[in-house]
Amino acid sequence: MTRRASSGIFRSLAAQAIMGCVAILASWLVAGTDAAVSALIGAAAYFVPNTLFALRLLVGLFGSSRASPLTFFVGEAFKLGFAVLVLGLAAWLGRDWLVWPAMLLGLLSVLKGYALLLLFRKLP
């Protein structure tokens, strides 16, 4: 069970990373460097906390401590709070150069990374 669960976590993270890279590359090709950086910020706003949360789940799978439902909900709240914080900081600090459609494309592509798993029938 732990091997299958960890494999699914790694596949999900890989799919999110691939989708984020595709969004960054597409933004760069279509609208230039500012758009690529904006897409990177959008992708990182969700990918970074999601990766940290996945690592916490993996530690719970292979370590001696088990994750409780409270741990799961705290992790989800952390992911949401971090994403809101990063997007808010990007909007505040990047007023002059932030490309909103590219940032939202980066965010949504990482959020919908599972679509890549659906496409290749590799859902855990």
Image (cartoon, rainbow, N blue to C red):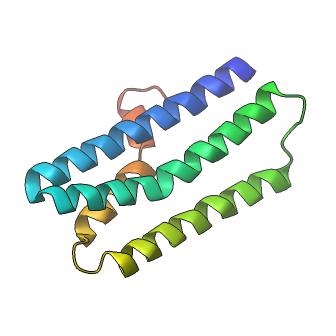
Quarter of image, res 6: top right
Q: Tell me: 113 left or right of 70.
A: left
* Residue in view at x 22 percent, y 73 percent: 97
From the viewer's perspective, is residue 81 above or below residue 4? below
Q: Is residue 51 visible?
A: yes
User: Which residue does the image show at 10% across and 49% down from the upper left?
Assistant: 29
| Residue situated in front as seen by the camera: 98 or 5 | 98
Q: How many marks?
A: 0
Q: Above or below — where is 97 with respect to 11?
A: below
Does residue 123 appear to the left or right of 80 in the view shown?
left
Residue closer to the observer: 9 or 120: 9
The residue located at (76%, 51%) in the rendering is 72
Relative to residue 15, is residue 82 depicted above or below? Answer: below
Quarter of the C terminus within the rendering: top right
Q: Position of residue 33 (x, y in %)?
A: 16, 56
**Nearest to the observer: residue 38 or residue 110:** 38
| Left or right relative to 21: residue 61 | right
* One can see residue 124 in this view: no
Horizontal side of residue 96 vs 84, given as left or right: left
**Could you tell me which quadrant the N terminus lies in?**
top right
Q: Position of residue 10 (x, y in %)?
A: 55, 29
Residue at point 33% right, 54% down? 40
Residue 2 coordinates in the image, percent (x, y): 74, 22
